[in-house]
Image (tube, rainbow, N blue to C red):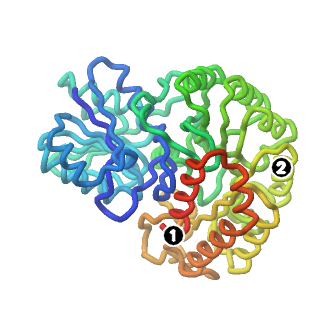
Amino acid sequence: MQLAFITPPVFVGKRPAERSAGCTHVVYLAPNIYELTVVAMVEQSALHQVTYRDFVSDNIGPKGFVSWLKTDNSEVYLMWTVNLSIDNDLEVIRHIRLHRPGAKVVLMGPGPTHFTQRCLPDDDTVVVRGEPELTVARLLDAWHRGEQWNHIEGISYRTNGQVVDNSARPLMRDLDTLPLPARQHIAHRSYYNPKLKCEPYTTAFTSRNCPYHCIYCVPSSLTFAREIEHRRHYGCKPPIAMRSVESVDHEMRQIHHMGYRAVGFMDDNFIWNEQRTLALCEVMRRYGLVWGCQARVDAITPTIAQALAGSGCRYVDLGVESFDDKILEYIKKGITSEQIYRAIDLLKQHGVPVKLNILIGCSPLETPQTVKHTLREAQRLDVDQVMFNIVSPFPGTEYYRICKQNGWIATGDYVPSDVQRTSILNLPNLSARQMERALFYNNISYFLSPRFVWHQLRQFTSWRQFVHACRALRVKLFG
């Protein structure tokens, strides 16, 4: 079959959705490593010819997309859909129906996993819920062979207008059986991460999901889809799945040979224990790659901090959210402010750049005073970067249920919103407007401070890096 995996341009709204993290609009371009893994899985079969088109990265707008669509001959179009892209992707389907009648459409990702009925506009669209690799491969093979397909686990579809939700597909336990992402489809594109200041850049993952119970948490778009589906059918968080160190080594060797110099790991939690972390650090050191990851503050030990420093780690994203212990307890973060300070101190001692993730409004205990305290602490600690976001009550989270029950959602129910820009919550002590103003003030105060500007300027090694960073900062601050 002729297949086209597409990241469509913006038909609805002003800015494209970021489809890997899934809860913001694009600040800087990054490859969707989850979708590229699905592509690789499909390409293991000799039955299909695959086209991969990222119209956002190629800077091709709606007119160019429609022109391409008119001349394309794909039988199936596949999209990775997040909450922020649902309206846009439904408009894309409308154009597919207009110019490619009879073609099938497959939607994957957290958007259709939760908003399944909304993402099934017709009988020729199929939703793949949760973890997509095996489901997509089996669905496409069945279509190619003309076999019965409506029994396949993990899909939803319409028949005579009625939505049918098939049973959930069991989660993959052995991630080593997955093929490596099909990066050959993006070899002509150059991605850049301002936190690493090194290119060419790509992303990777070594594990899926996280065992902790933060009430607000939306992990990456893949693991959120995985979590939504598992909670719906089993009432609990899904199990963690990890790749072996040998599997990661094999991928890093390939990345190195392809010419990549920088890697951002997308794991919800990269650091699980000292033994595994030290082995992964040795892999990164062996291939001379610079890299970054996300981690919990209670996972940072002196041994791990030293290993990170010696293996090219140029940032660790720490999920801090707040420096208020009562708020940390309410959101079930499982850490204390003392642990936050200790982790930052350990990383700074060993010269590992620290990025703090701060989440405004993640608890009804939040007030203008706690927000100001968090900003002051973030500035005082003099870390490499701070990311300020506004909490969103994502469906499928405990915080959504709390906010819905208490009538705190200003729009009545969840509507997709950019956590780097807008709020849909009116909390007891903090309104949506106050959160938006606090976010803007915090960003301006931090990112335009002389200390931050001078610190960043000293790290650039080329004019190109400086231009990339300035563009990302402009989008972050002003949209």
> Going 71% across and 52% down the picture, which residue do you hit?
318
Query: Which of 128 and 299 lies nearest the eye of the viewer?
Result: 299
| Three-letter code for the amino acid on which mark 2 is drawn | Lys
Q: CA distance from mark 2 to mark 1?
A: 31 Å
Closer to the eye: label 2 or 1 = 1
Q: Within 10 angstroms of label 2, few (less than 14), some, or many (20 or more) residues? A: some
342 lies left or right of 177:
right
478 lies left or right of 139:
right
How far across and how far down the image is residue 31, in percent? 47, 41
Query: Which of 122 and 150 lies nearest the eye of the viewer?
Result: 122
The secondary structure type at the circle numbered 2 is helix
Q: Can you name the residue that lies furthest to the top here? A: 46
149 lies left or right of 379:
left
| Three-letter code for the amino acid on which mark 1 is drawn | Phe
> Going 55% across and 54% down the picture, which residue do you hit?
467
> Going 71% across and 23% down the picture, which residue do you hit?
286
Point out the tag, 2 or 1, that comes first from the N-terminus: 2
| 404 versus 233 height, above or below | below
Q: Within 10 angstroms of label 1, few (less than 14), some, or many (20 or more) residues? A: few
The secondary structure type at the circle numbered 1 is helix
The mark found on residue 478 in the picture is 1
How far across and how far down the image is residue 470, in percent? 56, 59
Q: Is residue 349 visible?
A: yes
Tell me the residue that label 2 is attached to: 348
How far across and how far down the image is residue 19, in percent? 44, 49
Query: Which of 261 and 105 lies nearest the eye of the viewer?
Result: 261
How far across and how far down the image is residue 401, in percent? 53, 65
Callout 2 touching callout 1 (CB < 8 Å): no
